[in-house]
Structure formats: C-alpha cells, structure tokens
Amino acid sequence: MFIEGKQNWNKFVIKADEEMRLKDFLLNVMEFSTRAVSKMKREKLLLVNGEFQKPSTNIKLGDIIEITVDEEMSDFLSQDLSVEVLYEDFDILVMNKPPFMVVHPTKSHFDGTLANHVINYIEKSDESYKIRFVNRLDMNTSGIVVLAKNAYAHHILSKDMSDNLVKKEYIAVVDGIIENDEGTIDLPIMRESMESILRVVDERGQKSITHYKVIERLDNATIVGLRLKTGRTHQIRVHLSNIGHGIIGDELYGKVDDSLINRQALHACKIGFNQPRMKNRINIESQLPEDMKLLIKKLGGKSIDY
C-alpha cells in the first residue's frame, strides 16, 4: 500500500488497493482522527493523483493518495544533551537514554530531560514534529526510548504494544542468587495508594507478567535478562523485589549500596517492532552502560559483553 522510497516524516504516499470513500480510507484504514481529517480538508492537505480532493471523494484502485501531516513542534526548551541516536527513519526516532535523565519535562524537571534534547535534535534535522514517546523509562533506568514522528506511527506502535507485537528486553543486576535458570513472574500490580508513587503486588491490581533468564551468577548477586509481556509502571522492579531479588541500587524496591552503583542497575537493552508503514521488522540494541559494567566487575563478573 505505501510506496517505498516516497515517504517522509510528514507525508504519506499510498497506492489505493481498493475502492472506497477517501474519508473512510483516512478514518478506518489509516486510523486518523476525525479532527485530523478535518484539518487536512481545511488546509487542503489531501491529494489524489496530484490534485486536492475532499474527503467525500471516492478513490479507485491504483489511485495515488498523498497525505501531508502539518503539526506544531512541542514547546520545550531546546538543549543539546549529547544523547546517542540508535535508529531513525521517517516515522521513528530511537534514543539511548543515559541514567539520571527524566524522559519528559515536569514541574520539578523542566529542563535537562530527553524531550529537551529531542527538540534540539529536531531543530538541527530540518524537521518539525510533535514529540510522542512510545515507551518511557524511569529517571534512573538507562537504555532504549522510542519516539514517533507522527500520530499515525504513534497509534500503530501503541496498538502493536497492546497486541504484544513489540518485544522489549532489559538487563538487571539483582541482589542474591536466583536459583532457577529461567522463569515467569505472573503477579498483579497496583499503586500502593493514590498519594504514593510506590507499586505493590496485590490481587486487585492489573495483570503483570515478566519473563526472566539468568545470564550469570556473581558474588551474592545475579545478572538477569528480562522480557516484558505487560508494561506496568515499575513492573520489573516490583516483580524482582517480590521474589526476593531486588535490583541493586533501587531506592524504592531494592538494595542500596553507593559503593557498588549510585542508581538502579536496570538497562533497556533490546527492542523489536514492525515499522509502522512498511511493516519490516526492526531490531535495536543498546550496549550496557559503563556504570553497570563496573558494578558487574566489582561483583566478580566475567569480562564479556552482555
């Protein structure tokens, strides 16, 4: 359907493979919102075979549809924070978030966030899109963060996440020796109270599933790989703590020892997803950061890449 080689971050070029109203195509096939379609009509951003057409137009098999998405850029302070880009195409930007960085500005963190850096990156790339995070990480978790460059990509990836088509993997260093080589933690999670940021395992909570596999056993610690089937807030941290193996450095749920590491030893190391338009599989990896490598060395780990 999408014509390879003619795509852009704000323009969709599609060859119609069935006859229908243009409006039905936009709403039901492309899954744009009614508001977005109204804006396209008002600003004449819909072309069929090179000419503007109203959404009420009937499209025919083989028609070339061009859709331009015009959005204002997010209004955040622009800062170059030297964050590594792991992957980029016309729909997706994947960043390697360092530890101690908040993903999105808040009242207490209005600058120095990943979003501030992305604004700076967009300005230098001659593009102009609203920042939409597909996934987020806690401030003290490092690794892969995915952003969508348009509403269509964000919608498709969010839907794929709900359908378990996005595969996310993490690596953590936890307290104690995990005896089983692999296993699944299937425990519901809920907020401890409306006023608390803490999450707890509770039968009233949302279904939460974490698969784990031991990578290496250290000196009273374990390196463990983790794969999420669900994506609840603090899920990995709560699940590991509940089985008696809290993440080293985790101030809320784990074992804190500043002589080992000064943040939770958790890193988002891999992600796999389908490109929203072209549907090819994209697999991205992020190398273990230096502070976690040093932690593993302190705990007697082997000199290998994880």
Image (cartoon, rainbow, N blue to C red):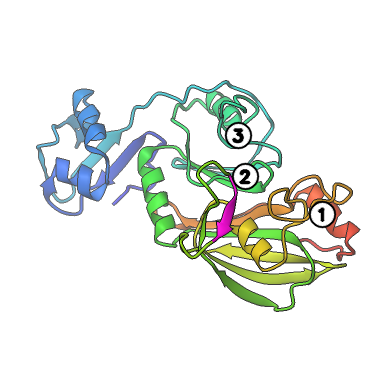
Q: Please give left or right for residue 138 compared with residue 76 in the image.
A: right
Discs 1, 2 touching: Cβ within 8 Å: no
Decide if residue 65 is on the left or right side of residue 155.
Answer: left
Magenta span main SS: strand
Magenta-drawn stretch contains 198: yes
**CA separation, marks 1 and 2?**
20 Å
Disc 3 target residue: 114
Q: First in sequence: mark 3 or mark 1?
A: 3
In the rendered structure, which amino acid carries the disc numbered 2?
A: Asp
- Tell me the quadrant of the picture where the C terminus can be found: bottom right
User: Closer to the N terminus: mark 3 or mark 2?
Assistant: 3
Residue 292: x percent and y percent? 79, 52
Look at the image and give the residue range highlighted in magenta: 197-201
Residue at 61 percent of width and 29 percent of height: 117
User: In the rendered image, which residue does mark 1 sit on?
Assistant: 293
- Judged from the image, the secondary structure of the residue bearing numbered disc 3 is helix
Query: Disc 1 vs disc 2: which is toward the camera?
Result: 2
**Structural crowding at the residue carrying mark 1, measured as other residues with C-alpha within 10 Å and reported as few (<14), some (14–19) or many (≥20):** some
Where is residue 224 drawn, in percent x and y? 71, 66
Query: Mark 2 Cα within 10 Å, few/some/many (few <14, many 20+)?
Result: some
Q: Return the mark for residue 138.
A: 2
* Residue kind at label 1, given as amino acid type: Lys
